[in-house]
Amino acid sequence: MEERTAQARWERRTQRPLLALAVGFAVAYAVPIVDSSASRSLTVACTVTEWLVWGAFAADYLVRLAIAPHRKEFVRTHWLDLCAVVLPLLQPLRLLRLVSTLMLVGRRARMASQIRLTTYVAGAVVGLLMFGSLAVLSVERDSPHGNIKTLGDAVWWSFTTMTTVGYGDHAPTTGLGRILAVGLMLSGIALLGVVTANIAAWFIARFEKDDVEERRQTAAIEALTEEVRALRAEVAALSGPPVPHPLAPEEAGPRP
């Protein structure tokens, strides 16, 4: 019990610092892509920042694993976190650091009880649009046959891809860009499913609430009806048999 409390306390205390580091990772990832003429020292600083943020999330996973009451169960239920931690070590590509850090940020944010589903979905949409645009721009900008050359082109492509519209005016031509496109399509479909399910659940809950209220009112009316019937029966019992009226003079007969 104490270990579970320690784990919850750790997650509560580290939530805001880790989200702040996630914002720093976003800035460090975006600067060299948006500013293609950035100096080497700035690019190196951004790369170091990316690794530090990933390292912070990896350390958070290790700490939560160490204080978990059942470590095997923790690894089994947090296998995506483990994959996100190990992924960049196997092949230290910048894109893998992006994917793994986004996975860790998403998993960590989902555990926050005060983050509502709407806020989480909205944040996921904005994050996917931003990082999808930056990632495809970084791999397609130097492609000789590519047509995604500016940030505006990349953002437009991300919008049309996530919404599964796919106008085709901008499309990735490299293998890595197409892999990004597949991931963005699947993410868009998943988020759309979450939003649709959330709206459907809201309507169902609303209808159920109205149905429960209607049943409650019907039961109250029936209870009042039964109570009125019982009161009528009590009044009839207390009043006794009807008293006969005295006979009229003409019905009393002749006097002796």
Image: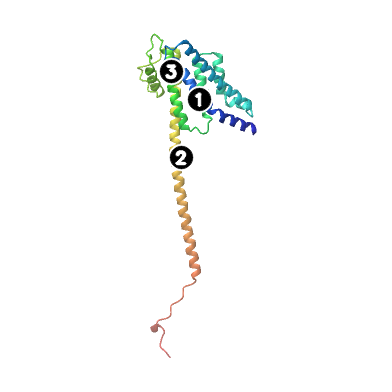
Which-is-in-front pick, marks 2 and 3? 3
Q: Is residue 190 visible?
A: no
Q: Helix, strand, or loop for circle 2?
A: helix
**Pointer 3: residues within 10 angstroms few (<14), some, or many (20+)?**
many
Which-is-in-front pick, marks 3 and 1? 1
**Upstream in the sequence, badge 1 or badge 2?**
1
Coloration mode: rainbow
Which quarter of the image is occupied by the C terminus? bottom left
Residue 38: x %, y % from top left: 44, 12
Disc on res. 20: 1
**Upstream in the sequence, badge 2 or badge 3?**
3
Q: Judge by depth and name the residue closer to the eye, 207 or 97.
A: 97
Residue type at tag 2: Ala
Quadrant in the rendering for residue 152: top left
Q: Helix, strand, or loop for circle 1?
A: helix
Q: Is residue 124 visible?
A: yes
Q: Residue at x 45, y 43 (%)?
A: 209
Disc on res. 239: none
Q: Residue at x 46, y 48 (%)?
A: 215
Q: Which residue is mark 3?
A: 134
| C-beta proximity under 8 Å, tags 3 and 1 | no
**Upstream in the sequence, badge 3 or badge 1?**
1
Q: Which residue is mark 2?
A: 205
